Every structure is written in structure tokens, then in C-alpha cells.
Amino acid sequence: MSFIQDLADKLAAEVIAAQPELEDDRFYEQVGRVLLTASPTLNEVFMTSIRIRLAEQRGRTFFEKALAAKRKGEAAPEAPKDLSAH
């Protein structure tokens, strides 16, 4: 990773980890606005890291629920509908 990617990703990880304590699951948006005023480039990389990390969390949660359901003999959760198949 480049220097800016390292900075942005570290900040994204720390912000996501702190959001439950802050009781604000969209606090990253405020941080993003602060970054945007100082460095649009850092903001862009930060927001990309946030999106990737949040997507990974959602995917992991779905995976863990599906695996747990299978092991218990229960119905697996449904994945979101594929909106691109029109």
C-alpha cells in the first residue's frame, strides 16, 4: 500500500471500531467531511476503505449466520436479490 492508503485504512479501521462506543454507526461520514476539507484525496481513499470494510463485515455476518443455520439444521438467511438481473 502507499503512504496515503496506509493512513486512510488505519483511520478507517479505528473509526469503525469506535462507532459502537460513540453510538453512531455513520460517524465515518463526519470524519469523511473533515478529511474532505483538508484533503479530497485522503477523503476518497478513506471512504473507499470504509466501504470495503463495511462490505466485508456484512459479508462475514451473512456467512457466519448461514453456516450456523446449516449446522443447526435451520433455514439459511436469504441473500439480497440480484438487482442487476433485469
Image (cartoon, rainbow, N blue to C red):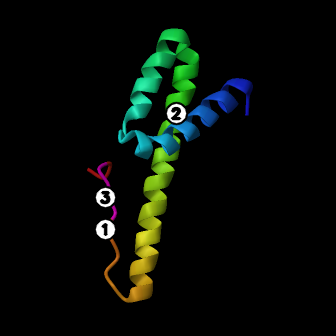
Badge 2 is on which residue?
Answer: 48
Mark 1 vs mark 2, CA separation in Å: 26 Å
Q: Are marks 3 and 2 in contact (CB under 8 Å)?
A: no
Marks 3 and 2, how far apart at CA: 22 Å
Disc 1 residue type?
Answer: Glu
Residue at image point 43% right, 44% down:
21
Q: Residue at x 36, y 42 (%)?
A: 23
Is 49 magenta? The answer is no
Mark 3 packing: few (<14 Cα in 10 Å), some, or many (20+)?
few
Question: In this view of the protein, which residue sits in the foreground, 36 or 30?
Answer: 30
Q: Are marks 1 and 3 in contact (CB under 8 Å)?
A: yes
Q: Which quadrant holds the N terminus?
A: top right
**Of label 1 and label 2, which has the lower sequence position?**
2
Judged left or right of residue 6, residue 59 is left
Q: Where in the figure is residue 50, as x and y percent of width and height?
A: 50, 37
The answer to whether the residue labelled 1 contacts the one labelled 2, judged by CB atoms less than 8 Å apart, is no
Q: Main secondary structure of the magenta part?
A: loop
The label on residue 78 is: 1
- The residue range painted magenta reads 79-83
Label 1: state its secondary structure.
loop
- Image: 63 above or below 40: below
Q: Which residue is mark 3?
A: 80
- Structural distance between the alpha carbons of marks 1 and 3: 6 Å
Q: Position of residue 64 (x, y in %)?
A: 46, 70
Name the quadrant containing residue 81: bottom left
Q: Picture coordinates of residue 41 (x, y %)?
A: 57, 17
